Image: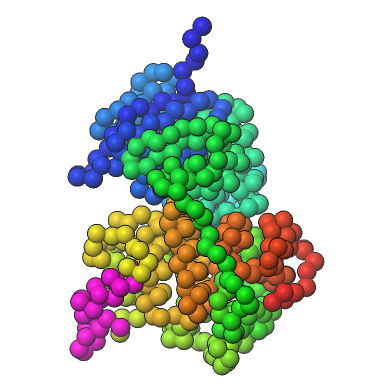
């Protein structure tokens, strides 16, 4: 008796964009009821392969079979009719309509009814959202945080009657608690026979929830294995084509240097009585659940939003920061968690992005930008960050996620900062670029720049930072360092209602 064919087979898929070969021999097979990881560096061809499966792109050659039968997928609508759903990493909600209307947009588009919505739609949306998060389905989607928007995107996919679900970095914007809820849902879907393709750079997730993993590199299939039969190091080495010794550089040696930044009693409606110090040589982490106030503290300190009150000292001198321009002038800068929304100008050249915070540095006579100075600055800073680009005149949108993040960081370095707050600095970048960014941050700390990192990825906080302050319900409830800096201790402090003395180890 012949075994049943795989739910999905993609064989020898090729795709070129002009002279660029994005895919040479893309291959993937998916079984009903399995969670199958798809791993590879940015530019490896993962997104191109999945966009072909979703009908967004047409392959130049190769074959796709579902249940052993060849299919041609010429549009996302066709993919959906075949039972394929795709949760993209890039959020694509309509900001001005309600969460409920976003969730059921596909159904609305296909309906012949003139009016949609009402209490029934709200109730159904609330039912879909309940296992994921407490989000009011009546709210306009544009009022939600990034993590909440990502959960709405996931909820949209769960309303579709799909046999194949693709998730592209679904936990990039989620807290550990939210991610665990998602994993429970994915396991339930797999138990019902749904095949799940799970794209992730996070080894803990790949080996925690996935049955098999396929690795791609340079547009080609490299290997497919059961996760039980290999190690994370095997996957990383296959992804990068070389041995990657560690994601995290050595930590600070000895005692920290002099105090660079001190904050006392920083308060607004979103956080209360925040006090901490940042020392030369250390990387200071901020942990906690999304919504606890970590990003709000940084943005309040930077005068980017709110009207925070409190006292701030820089190198021992008290400073009055009225707005973000004051912060830049003092050398205190911020890297947003929303790279494409706030971190870079996607449609502008790399050189223009790097110069954006202080145009005077590249200006010539009469304040007009000098293209040669602008290009020279970009080459110098980009080179120090190992920014991979054929030309500094290329648009940032043409770069991989890791290189876009390096442009965002280069923009900050152009003003010769004294303190950098980085919000989710490696979100959505591949493992090789992540290791490079970690090394850059350690090098900056070693050179005397104050580095503060906000991250929802607990292994990153523990592996990169010398000390972690945990935020819960708008307050710093404790600090951890050395052997006390564990995932269990961070999550215990982060839990709402945690009993910890503010500033315990500051």
Q: Position of residue 118 (x, y in %)?
A: 56, 45
Taking the image as drawn, is residue 190 in sight?
A: yes
Q: Residue furthest bottom?
A: 317
- x, y percent for residue 245: 49, 53
Query: Which residue is depicted at the point 64% across and 40% down?
Result: 184
* Frontmost residue, 266 versus 416: 416
Check if residue 4 falls in the magenta segment: no
Is residue 279 or residue 43 the one in the foreground? Answer: 279
Image coordinates for residue 497, horizontal then vertical, percent: 77, 63
- Stretch of the chain drawn in magenta: 361-382
Residue at 75% from the left image edge and 74% from the top image edge: 504
Position of the C terminus, as image quadrant, is bottom right
Give residue 436's quadrant in the image.
Answer: bottom left
Specify whether 404 is left or right of 297. Answer: left
Left or right side of 15 for 290 = right
Residue furthest to the right in view is 499
Question: Where 69 falls versus 243 (above or below)?
Answer: above
Residue beneath the point at 47% across and 23% down: 7
Residue 364: in magenta span: yes
Q: Position of residue 204 (x, y in %)?
A: 58, 46
Coloration of the structure image: rainbow
In this view, the residue in front, 293 or 432, is 432
């Amino acid at each position: 008796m012949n075994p049943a064919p795989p739910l999905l087979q993609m064989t020898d898929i090729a795709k070129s964009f002009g002279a660029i070969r994005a895919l040479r021999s893309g291959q993937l097979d998916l079984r009903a009821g399995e969670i199958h990881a798809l791993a590879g560096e940015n530019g490896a061809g993962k997104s191109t392969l999945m966009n072909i499966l979703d009908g967004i792109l047409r392959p130049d050659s190769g074959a796709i079979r579902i249940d052993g039968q060849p299919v041609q997928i010429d549009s996302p609508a066709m993919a959906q009719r075949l039972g394929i759903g795709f949760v993209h990493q890039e959020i694509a909600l309509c900001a001005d309509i309600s969460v409920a209307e976003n969730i059921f947009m596909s159904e609305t588009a296909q309906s012949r009814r003139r009016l949609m919505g009402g209490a029934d739609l709200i109730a159904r949306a609330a039912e879909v959202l309940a296992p994921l998060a407490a989000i009011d389905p009546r709210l306009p989607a544009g009022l939600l945080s990034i993590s909440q928007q990502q959960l709405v995107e996931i909820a949209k996919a769960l309303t579709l009657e799909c046999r194949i679900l693709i998730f592209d970095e679904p936990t990039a914007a989620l807290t550990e608690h939210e991610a665990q809820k998602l994993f429970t849902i994915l396991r339930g879907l797999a138990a019902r026979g749904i095949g799940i393709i799970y794209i992730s750079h996070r080894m803990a997730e790949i080996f925690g929830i996935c049955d098999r993993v396929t690795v791609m590199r340079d547009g080609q299939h490299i290997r497919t294995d059961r996760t039980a039969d290999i190690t994370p190091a095997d996957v990383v080495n296959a992804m990068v084509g070389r041995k990657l010794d560690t994601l995290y550089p050595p930590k600070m040696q000895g005692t920290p240097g002099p105090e660079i930044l001190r904050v006392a009693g920083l308060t607004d409606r979103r956080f209360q009585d925040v006090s901490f110090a940042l020392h030369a040589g250390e990387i200071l982490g901020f942990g906690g659940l999304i919504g606890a106030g970590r990003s709000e503290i940084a943005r309040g300190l930077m005068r980017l939003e709110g009207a925070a009150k409190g006292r701030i000292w820089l190198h021992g001198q008290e400073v009055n920061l009225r707005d973000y321009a004051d912060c830049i002038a003092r050398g205190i800068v911020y890297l947003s968690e929303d790279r494409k929304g706030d971190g870079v100008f996607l449609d502008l050249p790399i050189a223009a992005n790097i110069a954006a915070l202080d145009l005077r540095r590249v200006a010539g006579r009469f304040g007009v930008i000098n293209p040669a100075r602008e290009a020279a600055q970009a080459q110098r800073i980009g080179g120090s960050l190992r920014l991979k680009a054929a030309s500094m005149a290329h648009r940032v949108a043409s770069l991989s996620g890791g290189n876009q993040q390096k442009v965002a960081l280069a923009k900050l370095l152009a003003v010769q900062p004294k303190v950098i707050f980085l919000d989710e600095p490696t979100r959505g970048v591949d493992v090789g670029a992540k290791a490079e960014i970690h090394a850059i941050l350690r090098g900056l700390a070693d050179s005397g720049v104050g580095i503060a990192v906000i991250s929802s990825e607990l292994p990153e906080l523990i592996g990169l930072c010398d000390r972690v302050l945990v935020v819960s319900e708008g307050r710093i409830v404790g600090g951890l360092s050395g052997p006390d800096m564990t995932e269990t201790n961070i999550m215990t402090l982060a839990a709402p209602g945690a009993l910890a003395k503010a500033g315990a180890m500051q």
